Image: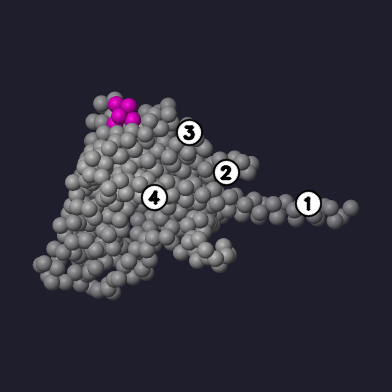
Amino acid sequence: MAPPATAAPLTTRWQRLLQPFLLVNAIGIVVALGIWLYGREIALLNSLRLQLAAHLPPLLVLPLLGMVGGGLAGALIGLEPAARGSGIVQVLQWLRGRPIPMGWQVAVVKLIASGLAIGSGIPVGPEGPSIQIGASVARETSRGLGNRHERLAVAIGSGAGLAAIFHAPLGGLAYFLEELQKRTDLRVNATAAFATFAAVFWTRLLNSPAGGPLLWRNLVPISDYPSPLADLRLIDLPLLLGLGALAGLLALPYQRGILGLRRRLAALRQPPWRLLALVGMVSGVGWALLPPEFENPAQVGLRALGGVVDPAQALLMLGLQGAGTALAVAADAPGGFLAPALVVGACLGTLVQQLALLLFHTAPNTLMFAGGGAFLGALTRTPLTAILLTFELSKDYRLVLPIGFCTLTAIAVAERFERHTIFETIQSEQPHP
């Protein structure tokens, strides 16, 4: 009778080890599949938009597509109000105990509505929806496996969604720790790290080029951000600190402008389909009036981060991306502003670089990525997320120090004048159910 008594604790021990492994892999696979579908939807709609604009007058096609895409996205949001906005606020509210819907319906509506909005040209980013999609499918996956730790699953799924959309596991993990979990627990942190890495692994597998045996495919990121950078010099430090201070100062009126415009639009009490149709049409007119190289919003961001734009283009991109994203975010379009913030910051870095070249005949070519990380950090006050996410996008270790100096300066300046982030303000203004 002795062996059975020993076998039971051993079986229980193996179950305790196996359950977290199955949970994080299940979350990683389901989140990766959702983000892969989301990315394919955006790419397909954007490709259709560009093809139509190439054969028909852009001033006719782009506003019309923006109006139709925005109207459809708004109609879907009207059916599921929890899918409005970036989705980050909803996840934060749910984690703080608010009865916010979080499940398959929210994930599906968010995926379709956000894909329609971004694919039709509304200048918002995919990272906020990916966070909400990841959180929703992670919760349902956890419930399906009989796991009782739904809060942990939602937080892990959020970080995994961010990691998967940017192919940035460290940035996703940092977001989980800084914004969602806000606590130190070795087992929880290790579980979250495994989930974010698993989500990126499965996302890269789904995006790997077809051909050859599946087991031998190279799981590299699908986007390549060029960063032919020079080494960091002591003379570069004042410019990096100055750019960080400038980014922190500009983030303040930008955040306040979005919040003020959001209150004005809310006072109009327009249905979401009508408001987002108007935003889509205005965005389409803006894209149509720009040179042809600006017709593809995704390439605009890549070119800004890669530093291949001249000062005039950088100034134009900064104004267009900043104003367009502010309008879309204020109208609760289903998209985020983290990725657009990287573009705005990169354009700001380009302008500072060109000014330094004009005045001092020398300037570091690290300012584009450093500016992107600084503006993102100033808006979110998440230093590790901003630094690691921007570094992982660049794929260049030499950028860690420039991005770090610039981002931490921006956060210090922004925190000096404004204690609350845009997410915290929106949470406080929304009525309790």
Where residue 138 sits: x, y (%)?
53, 44
Q: Name the residue type under label 4.
A: Ala
To which residue does mark 2 refer?
141
To which residue does mark 1 refer?
8
Where residue 75 sits: x, y (%)?
38, 30
Describe residue 304's horizontal placement relative to residue 88 as left or right: left
Q: Give, as a single range, the part of the protein colored magenta.
A: 270-275
Q: Secondary structure at mark 4?
A: helix
Front position among marks 2 and 1: 2
In the image, 410 versus 80, the foreground residue is: 80
Q: Secondary structure at mark 3?
A: loop
N-term-proximal mark, 3 vs 4? 4
N-term-proximal mark, 3 vs 2? 3
Q: CA distance from mark 2 to mark 4?
A: 27 Å
Please say if 290 is above or below 349.
above
N-term-proximal mark, 2 vs 4? 4
Name the residue rendered at 42%, 52% in the picture: 165
Please say if 320 is above or below 76.
below
To which residue does mark 3 refer?
101
In the image, 362 versus 401, the foreground residue is: 362
Q: Which residue is outermost to the top? A: 269
Residue contact at pointers 2 and 1, CB within 8 angstroms: no
Where residue 167 sits: x, y (%)?
43, 58
Name the residue rendered at 16%, 60% in the picture: 311
Q: CA distance from mark 3 to mark 4?
A: 28 Å
Q: Name the residue type under label 1.
A: Ala
Residue contact at pointers 1 and 4, CB within 8 angstroms: no
Q: What label does residue 43 carry, if any?
A: 4
